Amino acid sequence: MSSDEGSDPLLNEVRRHHLERVNGVLRRPGMYGRDEMAERLLLEAMAAVDGSLTRWWAECDRLSERDAFNALGVEGAYSDILPADALREATASVYAEIAHRLGWLELDRALSAAEHQRLSADIGGWVTQNRTLSEVIETFGPPSLWIGGTNPFFPKTLGYVTASRDDDLMCFHLWNAFADTAPETGLRGVHPEPVVLAVRHRPGPFPGAFSFTPEGLRRRPSADQSDPLRPAVWIFHGDHARHASGVFDTLDAGLAWAAEHQVTGILAEYPYGGAYDVAVSEGRFTPSKPHHGTPDHVAAFSPGLCHIHLIDGRTD
């Protein structure tokens, strides 16, 4: 907001109204519709009221640059991370992070800098075993933002952040569902309470932002579910190395190996088959120059899929 905030009572009332709506959709997104259009409309309206449209548009561009937004939106980027019934709350968390950076997110609890640093340092190891909602709160305290309802049979996302707009919102994505039981037994959950599937806590490219629990890996959509036309592997190529030194079925397997050996280089997603042929068949590349499709061009063609820079085993 500009420095003359408070000089116009009507504008202040409009701003308070929009802030209330923004914080409402970020806490109970399912009440505002089945997809993220509500977040985009309300946050853009908030930006207009706040004189921040240029910053809002820049944030939207950044989502695409990070592979956090595709043809199906942020939800599409999450579709190969979480089960379909956990996408709505998770998607809202990305817009909540933008709202925090732009000064619109009203936190239920602001972490201290020390708490935020400890969470950031510990979380990767903490989720190497299955964790419950109770364990999250017992370990890290009440969240800064609770996305979703309190019903223990439904998914939800818990966000943790400091009051500083420069700090990233770290998000725990939890899941549960009704178990398939006989009517006489009453309603039961697949788990007694929601369990953590993944935590979004790394900056940089969206596919590398997550750590998964064993349950999260088990329930993560398969390559066939997320993209049946393009099975892929992840290949590590070290800086200054002549040859690739690792091939992995999943991103998580590659990241775990890189962290174990503290290597520096690029972990990249490659399709099965020739990178050039797959890109042409999927419409990601259209030959338009005489040298396109020549042996030298095909031999040097990049897959053009996701890639993650690593320094000493950590995402850059």
Image (spheres, helix red, strand yellow):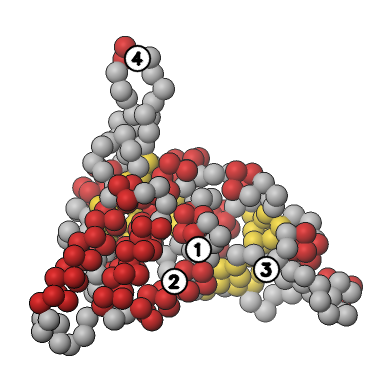
Q: Which mark is residue 183?
A: 4
The residue carrying mark 1 is 69
Residue placed most toward the observer, 108 or 258: 108
Of the two numbered discs 2 and 4 on the same chain, state the one appearing first in sequence.
2
Residue placed most toward the observer, 178 or 267: 178
Is the Cβ of the residue at disc 1 closer than 8 Å to that at disc 2?
A: yes
Q: Left or right of 176: which side holds 49?
A: left
Residue 66 in percent (x, y) is at 50, 69
Q: Left or right of 95: which side holds 235?
A: right
Give the structural element (helix, strand or loop) at label 4: helix
**Residue 179 sits in quarter:** top left
Tag 1: residue type?
Phe
**Distance CA(mark 4)–CA(mark 3):** 51 Å
Residue placed most toward the observer, 60 or 204: 60
Residue 169 in percent (x, y) is at 32, 64
The residue carrying mark 3 is 304
Tag 2: residue type?
Cys
Of the two numbered discs 1 and 2 on the same chain, state the one appearing first in sequence.
2
